[in-house]
Image (spheres, rainbow, N blue to C red):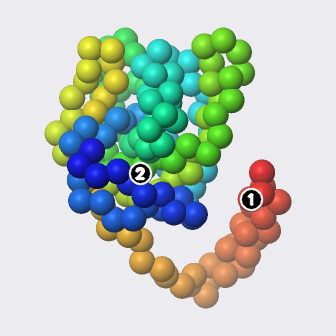
Amino acid sequence: MSTDPAPVEDGTTLQQPSWAALPLFPLQTVLFPGGLLQLKVFEARYLDLISQCLRRQQPFGVVCLVQGSELRGGSDKPQFESTAVLAHLQAVDAEQAGILLVRCLGGQRVQLGQSHRRADGLWLSEASAGPDDLPAAVPPELLGSAGALAKAIEPRNGS
């Protein structure tokens, strides 16, 4: 990374120019800025990644798989989306030996460049800061749905 991301309270990061080798955690799901992600980590490459991120207090990139498997040894070469989101560690607990329960908060979007796989299977990618989301008003026809959704997630927000 050319400069260390500086996390701020809401999980976003201060704008950074680029990362030479951002570690990636490919998933068949999407992490959004400000979103929460819980992971059960058991593969050695990701256990090492989480340990490194804890020590260095640095995020990693969560990227959605377009093709391939989350698990090492899949038959297809994985293909990723071109945009990832920085995942900031909030909590890491050892469920049992060799298994970590990890809670992450989505930060800044990043645009991915060239990716390569290390010998241990961990993917690294060049990355540059992506654009921030612009605030948008909820369309009038969706206000009822937005209110219901807000009520549904409100009790879970503090957990």
CB under 8 Å between discs 1 and 2:
no
**Residue 79 visible in this rendered orientation of the protein:** no
Return the residue nearer the eye: 108 or 78: 108
Vertical side of 145 occupied by 24: above or below: above
Question: Secondary structure under badge 2?
Answer: strand
Vertical side of 16 occupied by 83: above or below: above
Q: Which residue is mark 1?
A: 157
Which residue lies most toward the front here?
A: 55
Vertical side of 25 occupied by 44: above or below: above
Q: Is residue 39 left or right of residue 113?
A: right
- Residue 19: x and y in percent read 25, 47
- Residue 45: x and y in percent read 42, 19
Q: Which residue is mark 2?
A: 85
Residue at point 21% right, 35% down? 115
Question: Secondary structure under badge 1?
Answer: helix
Badge 1, how many Cα within 10 Å: few under 14, some, many 20+?
few
Vertical side of 112 occupied by 139: above or below: below
Return the residue nearer the eye: 110 or 75: 110
Badge 2, how many Cα within 10 Å: few under 14, some, many 20+?
many
**Residue 87 visible in this rendered orientation of the protein:** yes
